[in-house]
Amino acid sequence: MTSREMMHRSESAVSIELQTPDMTLNIGPQHPSTHGVLRLVAKVDGERIREVEPVIGYMHRGYEKLAEVRTYAQITALVNRIDWVSGFASEVPFILGVEKLMGVEAPERAQWIRLILSELARISSHLVFISSYPLELGATTPLMHSLREREYILELIEEVTGGRFHPNFNRVGGVKSAYGGGSTTKKQSMDLPAGFFKRTSEAMDRMDKICDDIDTLVTGNELIKMRTVGVGIIPPDKALEFGLSGPNLRASGVAYDLRKSDSYLTYDQVEFDVVSRPGGDCYDRYLVRLHEVRESVKIIRQAIDMIPSGPLQAKVPRVLKAPKGHVYSRAENPKGEFGYYIVSEGGKMPYRLKIRSTSFSNLTILPWILKGQLIPDLVAIMGSLDFVLGDVDR
Amino acid sequence: MNFWLLLVIEVVVMLLLVLTSSLVVIYAELKAGSHMQSRIGPYYAGGRWGWAQPLADGLKFLQKEDLSPTGADKTVYGFAPYVVLMSTLAIFVVIPLGPDLVAVDLDVGVYFVLAISSLSVLGILMAGWSSANKYSLMGGLRAAAQLIAYELPLVLAVVAVVVQAGTMSLNGIVEAQNDVWFSLGSFDVALPFVLRGQVLGFAIFMIAAVAELSRIPFDMPIAESELTMGYLTEYSGIRFTMFFLGEYASMVGLSAIAATLFLGGYGFPGVTGTWANILGPGILIGKIAVLVFLIIWIRWTWPRLREDQLQSMAWTWLIPLALLNIALIAGFKVVF
């Protein structure tokens, strides 16, 4: 080979584009921004994600199976542990389904109490999101401020139900008598703790204030906008295709809210707006949740004015048995549509309980949305979907 | 006095000064951060105000097991924290605390500072590569990319100061800022460079310094929520403490450089002669404290940028602005 030929060959060898194999990066199950034990097997090229495969089930607790060997009254203690950030809200659709199955209707006052507590749970859940989302983007301070305010909400829930996270407050045909409340059907004056409404409206004032504070600290922050605007855009058709619900869907411009479209409890009697944003990016998902806190505050203020007096518990038989049949009951939880499919063979326990948990359905979009994103954006997008691992794995 | 004795005294004094100041800064960060977050922060350690918290933390770290991963390159892994710490400590050698209070008054002090402070990224890259951890590697690479992007604006901002002062000696730069700029009647006005048209340069220097420190909003090499702890992921015990001390010491170091270059260093209007030697350290520490507080404040307020955003900010904004700054300062110098 002449030297000229050799030079030519070496040049052509150099000009071949360098091929590098993708690196497999295990994000999770132990990772600060996977909200628990989600594992993502990501194929990355540098910081660019080629594909990602979520691996779930690290937190599977078998609630659907456990429910088959528990009576209806016992199951409420299970289901509020599915999404622990908004424990009360996951009780509501279940108890509504059971009541529908048994043909019982809770008294008006109990319905209102459920509504107030559901909205408190929504505020608390959204405050957790508002606190943890900037944290994932690197801002630590909103966490402390909004978690401090959430404490007021948790205290309210605690003084009514006795539990901060797991209220287990719903009964078939009503709600439990409040702490120290005595018989619920006779003495309605002892159903809610004295001064509860006053403290609630004070807390609502605080919520308005923290929303304004967060607006100045986070919403208008240029760096937050740089990280979130235009990142992780979910178009409305994709959102519907993947079965997103709740704020994630509404941020894509689909104003779908079960509280309006399939009203339950007494949501048809209160005035509120369905918050939706057209963009579908992380910033919009954040804004929708922030505005929903304000809407919830509005709902609770109305509910305090409108709540009637009366019994807390409908008359139900001593031994609760559901007739043969099946029912699907759903509600708009903080994270989206939460549903229970209850099949009864006519006993004290359900034959089968299928839980349609929100976070699981919201998570199905991850492989599609994370394809081709950068690792910092992965964190931003994952955080903006606001899932709870207990809700994913059940 | 004996040369060796003097050397030992200088080294011990500098080391104590640096380590104490970084402990103080750690405490300041803990306390200031907590109050910004409506918390109390350290409270019990030391009996009052939790003043001994950094010491207690340090002691705790010393007791921890010094782990190294199985696949790690043990030598490089073990050596990396010291490279970071040494490059930081070396900055303090040339910082003048007073007209005569400087360990070594180099003619090329500025050059030395810039060269030695960029060595720390070598240690970070070593740490990231040798940890045998993918997150660490990515953290190390991010740090390297960040350094390349931010060393340039930093150097260019300093070049403008050198042009204005006409010297590369840090002492000389401080003296230049103490020189009379103009006189109003019989009243002589001597102003630090930041008030002599270096506002832009100062801003660029501080942004680049924060980037070099890898602190929020430029903490991508560590980025807890993305890369767990970046190049620090595998470190524990005393080696982690070294990194930690190094981070805070370089915070003090770069603030001291910024104070010297732009804020007049140990100089203060009306303080001259022997008084400058006596009050100089206090004045400089005061200026450092202001800058350190600024950096802490930023950290507890802002989120983190993305790596590509940081790069585009450096190349499309800071470097052109820094070049413009040099042109303006040089033009000013030539005309007047």
Image (spheres, grey):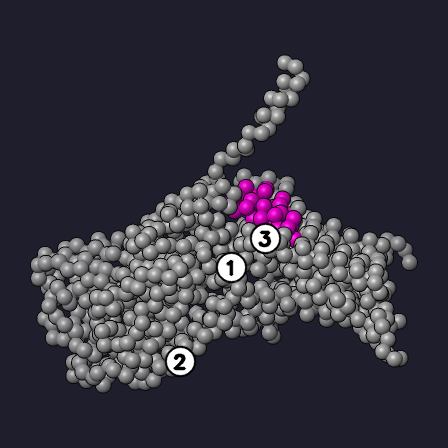
Q: Secondary structure at mark 1?
A: helix
Please tell me in which quadrant of the rendered image residue A178 appears. Answer: bottom left
Q: What amino acid is found at the position of numbered circle 2 in the picture?
A: Asp
Q: CA distance from mark 2 to mark 3?
A: 43 Å
**Sequence-earlier tag: 2 or 1:** 2
> What's drawn in magenta, residue-wise?
B123-150
**Residue at position x 10%, y 68% from top?**
A103
Determine whether, in the image, residue B202 is placed left or right of residue A77: right
Q: Secondary structure at mark 2?
A: helix
Residue A122 percent coordinates (x, y): 33, 69
Please tell me if label 1 and label 3 are on a single chain: no
Q: What amino acid is found at the position of numbered circle 3 in the picture?
A: Ser
**Residue at position x 62%, y 22% from top?**
A8
Residue A181 percent coordinates (x, y): 24, 81
Q: Which mark is residue A205?
A: 2
Using the rendered image of the protein, determine whether residue B248 is visible from the camera's viewpoint: no
In-front residue for pair B51/B81: B81
**Residue marked by disc 1:** A226
